[in-house]
Image: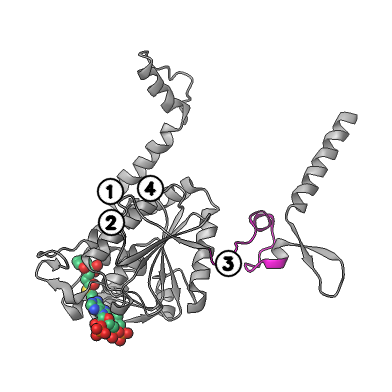
Amino acid sequence: MAEMLGKDFQTVNRRIASVAGHLIPSQNPNQNHTTTTTIAAANCSSGFDDTYHRVHGQVPTHIPEWTPAMDDAGAAFTDILYEKAVGEGIAKITINRPERRNAFRPQTVKELIRAFNDARDDNSVGVIIFTGKGTMAFCSGGDQSLRGKEGYADFDNFGRLNVLDLQVQIRRLPKPVIAMVAGYAVGGGHVLHMVCDLTIAADNAVFGQTGPKVGSFDAGFGASIMSRLVGPKRAREMWFMARFYSAAEAEKMGLVNTVVPVEKLEEETIKWCREINRNSPMAIRLCKSAINAADDGHAGLQQIAGDATLLFYGTEEGTEGKNAYLQRRKPDFSRFPRLP
Ligand SMILES: CC(C)(COP(=O)(O)OP(=O)(O)OC[C@H]1O[C@@H](n2cnc3c(N)ncnc32)[C@H](O)[C@@H]1OP(=O)(O)O)[C@@H](O)C(=O)NCCC(=O)NCCSC(=O)CCC(=O)c1ccccc1C(=O)O
């Protein structure tokens, strides 16, 4: 009996400690002593006051300390800025050609590919922000002054369309990529924000395809992903008319996740990054590959199947096979259940 009462007492104590863990001290200006308020009551912008929100709490919104980043090649970037937030697991990749409304040239795309590769390989990075320098443009597409008969040419005497490689890279990257869009996201720049996993738009953002006005089109992801996002009727409208849409219109169409005042853009984006980074990286990885799997055909299956192999390597069952091979014996899988 005494033992049972002791256990109950322990349970009550544990529960009180757990609830107290959700309490933060706050100073009441009218009183000289400290009172306690629940995190949910103090900060809850979502308006939910439940254990889920008390346990997970609020996400800090302060701007992080950015430090310049490099990749293994060590060559300086000329067309982009590549930064990581100290101690945060956030990388930021910025097209740095504001005088051209952040239009990309082949060199820009090569540098973007290097930075995205590095952010993928850095296992301290959980989320990548993709943006443009300044508030006038996220990206205005391919640099038309460099467009030739075979694509875009800057330092070579032949053209290329290497932005298509970048699109595929972002789509396959097993970490969330967030487009942080202020100003124009048009032409190939509009396609780039669409291939990102999420888009946080400033209230000055402008979206649209220009291709049919400038003698270009993206019949790849630019057509198929757009159609998924906004539906085929709207996608046809966007491509046939080549109109521009405000941030509010884009939000209504499902092109962006949220719209915030331009001066709050980075703060809000960082908040989303931190919120994602608090969650299970493997769950997020699988969610990304699962959402893309059907649309991406063999490549989509390969990504999600690779994730399954990755998980299987971490199991005892998988390890038994490897150990048996290394120990030159038959594997013994008899202890592993054949689940229904
Ligand atoms: C973006 C604008 C609407 C902004 O207008 P505004 O604020 O009035 O500024 P401007 O004075 O026009 O521009 C300032 C400055 O920047 C230069 N500039 C802007 N955009 C570009 C650009 N894309 N290329 C080259 N230069 C640009 C502009 O000339 C000015 O320079 P000054 O020296 O000061 O004069 C407006 O700028 C605008 O409409 N821009 C063009 C938008 C556009 O049509 N983009 C190209 C679309 S096609 C494309 O992107 C193809 C991409 C591609 O490679 C591809 C290939 C194959 C398959 C798929 C794709 C794909 O789509 O990704």
Residue 303's place in the image compared with 260, above or below, is above
For discs 4 and 2, the disc positioned in front in the rendered view? 4
Residue at 40% in and 76% down: 134
The amino acid type of the residue labelled 2 equals: Val
Tell me the SS state at disc 2.
helix
Tell me the SS state at disc 1.
helix
Q: Which mark, by number, is residue 168?
A: 2
Q: Earlier in the sequence, mark 1 or mark 4?
A: 4
Contact flag, marks 4 and 2 (Cβ < 8 Å)? no
Q: CA distance from mark 2 to mark 3?
A: 32 Å
Q: Could you say which quadrant of the image residue 308 lies in?
A: top left
- Residue toward you, 82 or 178: 82
Would you call the spot at circle 1 few (<14 residues within 10 Å), some (14-19), or many (20 or more)?
some
Contact flag, marks 2 and 1 (Cβ < 8 Å)? yes
Q: Residue tagged by mark 3?
A: 62
- Residue toward you, 108 or 287: 108
Q: Earlier in the sequence, mark 1 or mark 3?
A: 3
Contact flag, marks 1 and 4 (Cβ < 8 Å)? no
Bounds of the magenta segment? 42-64
Find out if the beta carbon at label 1 lies less than 8 Å from the nearest ligand 1 atom: no
Q: Is residue 6 left or right of residue 284?
A: right
Tell me the SS state at disc 3.
loop
Can residue 167 be seen here? The reply is no
The amino acid type of the residue labelled 1 equals: Ala
Q: Locate residue 334, reporting x and y percent.
A: 45, 18
